[in-house]
Structures are given as structure tokens and as C-alpha cells.
Image: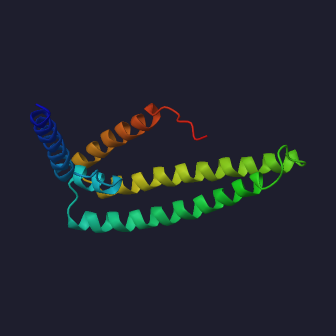
Amino acid sequence: MNNKWLKYVTGFALIINLGALAFWAIRKPPLPPEDVLVNALKLNDAQRREFAILKAQNHAVRDSLSQVMRRYRQSIYSRPIPAANAAETDSLISAIAQTYAHIERSSYQHFSDIRTLCGAEQQAQLDALLVEITSASHKKPHQERH
């Protein structure tokens, strides 16, 4: 009797494992955001080349601004809390806010530049995608990092 159940349990476990492996093998990894834009807008070769240039420029600006913001944050948190010099802390916090605004402005300009690459139909698709992307980013709940 025990031998019979062992065969059933082993067979069931084997089926579950094979199903999991098949799902893992068939599943497509998500596309990077840039590829989503390229595919959704059906950019032609010339547009793809221009898009690659714009993407590289945007990444360079964002990386540079992210480094600046990181330095400001390190300056704030490298001192004891509460800070002895609140005015200096407030100044650094304002600088972070201005840097973040610059990043947001850069992103807006980047999408504006992409829009100029597109034809009328692609522009409408891009506008719809941007609305979808920005509303999805606001729906995510805040997750604790502590």
C-alpha cells in the first residue's frame, strides 16, 4: 500500500516540476522601457538611430544629475542628526529639490524630442503611452524600505 502512494506522490511531484520548468522556459522576460517605446511606436531604422542618440544623451544627463543629488544627500546625512547648522541643511535640501526638478525637466524634454521624431500617428501613440506610464507610476503604493 505504501509503495502505491509513493508512486502517486512521486508522479504528482514530477508533473508539478515539469509544469514549473515549462512555464519558466516559455515565459518572456519583460522588455526594457526603451524597447517598449520602440516597439509600440514601430519606429523605422532612421527613427531608431535618432532614438538611440537621444537615449544616450538623456542617460548622460540623468546620470550626471543623479550623482549631484547623491553628493547632496551624502552631505546631509554625513553629519549628526539634528544638524548643528539647520540653514546649511535647508540649503542642501533645496538643492536636492532643484536637482530633482532639473531631472524631471530633462525627462520632459527627452520625450518632447522623441515626439519630434514621430509621425502624427506615432505622436498620438506616444501621448497615450505617456499618460499610461505616468498614471501607472502614481498608482504604486509606497513600500517600506526599513
For the C terminus, the quadrant is: top right
User: Residue 102's spot in the image, x, y percent?
Assistant: 59, 53
User: Observer-nearest residue: 23 or 27?
Assistant: 23
Residue 90, above or below 110: above
User: Observer-nearest residue: 146 or 68?
Assistant: 146
Q: Quadrant of residue 128?
A: top left
User: Residue 15's spot in the image, x, y percent?
Assistant: 13, 42
Looking at the image, which residue sits at the far right?
A: 84
User: Residue 131's spot in the image, x, y percent?
Assistant: 37, 37
User: Observer-nearest residue: 41 or 20?
Assistant: 20
Residue 92, above or below 6: below
Q: Residue at x 20, y 54 (%)?
A: 42
Q: Is residue 99 toward the left or the right of residue 30 in the image?
A: right
Q: Is residue 6 toward the left or the right of residue 145 in the image?
A: left
User: Residue 3's spot in the image, x, y percent?
Assistant: 11, 37
Mark count: 0
Q: Residue at x 39, y 36 (%)?
A: 136
User: Observer-nearest residue: 84 or 104?
Assistant: 84
